[in-house]
Amino acid sequence: MPELDERTAREVESAVARVVDKLLHTPTVRIKELAEAVPGNSYADVVRDLFALDPAATDVVTRADVIVADEGEVK
């Protein structure tokens, strides 16, 4: 935002950094907990658990047997 003076730009940058830090705190802590857990979790398992995703939804995008047609249809 070039119209902002330098002080305001620094304040906006600082505020955004604080918001990002706040948003990423819980997922960062959780991924560290998962990293220390029993080995064997796949990446999909960790992401599903971290973001509380529906297992059926993540299974669709991680299945090896999904074939995408030229028209963009999933078979």
Image (tube, helix red, strand yellow):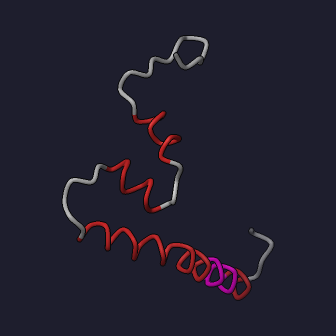
Where is residue 4 shown, x and y percent of the image? Answer: 78, 77
Above/below status of 32 relative to 50: below
Q: Is residue 38 above or below residue 58?
A: below
Look at the magenta stretch and give its main secondary structure.
helix
Q: Quadrant of residue 30?
A: bottom left
Q: Is residue 58 above or below residue 38?
A: above
Q: Which one is in front, 50 or 3? A: 50
Pick out the residue farthest to the right.
3
The outermost residue toward the left is 39
In-image side of 47 versus 72 (left or right): left
Residue 3, picture quadrant: bottom right
Q: Quadrant of the N terminus?
A: bottom right
Residue 34 location in percent, x, y? 31, 67
Q: Residue at x 41, y 72 (%)?
A: 28
Residue that appears at 59% across and 83% down: 18
11 relative position to 36: left or right: right
In magenta, the rendered stretch is 10-16
Measured as percent of width and height from the top left, residue 16 is found at 64, 77
Number of numbered markers: 0
Horizontally, is 23 left or right of 29 in the view? right
Q: Is residue 41 magenta?
A: no
Which residue is more in the foreground, 49 or 73? 49
Which residue is rendered at x = 36% and y = 68% of the image?
A: 31
User: With 59 as the anchor, is 37 left or right in this view?
Assistant: left
